[in-house]
Image (tube, rainbow, N blue to C red):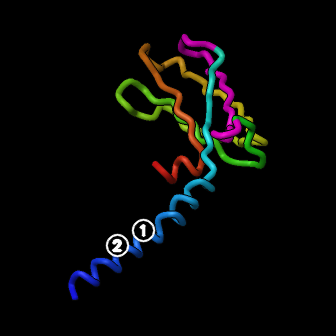
Amino acid sequence: MKTFSKYIIIVLNISLLPKTLHSQDSIQFRKLYLHTDRDIYFPGDSIWFKGYYLDANSHQFVSGIYSMYSDLIDDKGMKICSQIFPIVNGVAAGKFNISDSVKAGEYVVRAFTDLQKDLA
């Protein structure tokens, strides 16, 4: 009796495998690329940037309207500034104004979408 029940479980798992793999093929993977206008900034400058929201397979712009969340992060991992920008048909643009009181150091501009935010 024990052998029979193990056999049924194995068969059920194998029979579900093709449906699982098939459903993963239909997932649309998207990537958000970001570039800035320069590499080095000074206090009082503005960090201008542009984002491109692309389909990972076709590398085409994702159509529609989405939100791009952007953070300016210092070398200790603290958020200096956070803003939300619209992505319209795969393109977003924005800027961070660097205050005069910001200390010199290395900073990171991080950007992500609603979907990426939910997956993290």
Query: Looking at the image, which residue is at 70% across and 35% down?
Result: 59
Q: Amino acid at mark 1?
A: Ile
Is residue 73 toward the left or the right of residue 42 in the image?
A: left
The count of marks equals 2
Q: Is 1 above or below relative to 73?
A: below
Q: Which residue is mark 2?
A: 10
Give x and y (percent) for residue 58. Answer: 70, 38
Q: Which residue is mark 1?
A: 14
Residue numbers of the magenta segment: 38-58
Give x and y (percent) for residue 19. Answer: 54, 66
Q: Residues within 10 Å of mark 2 (few under 14, many from 20)?
A: few
Disc 1 and disc 2 in contact, CB within 8 angstroms: yes
> Which is nearer the eye, 104 or 4?
4
Q: Secondary structure at mark 2?
A: helix
Is 41 covered by the magenta stretch? yes
Give x and y (percent) for residue 20. Answer: 51, 63
Q: Amino acid at mark 2?
A: Ile
Q: Is 42 above or below relative to 98?
A: above
Query: Looking at the image, which residue is at 65% across and 27% down?
Result: 95
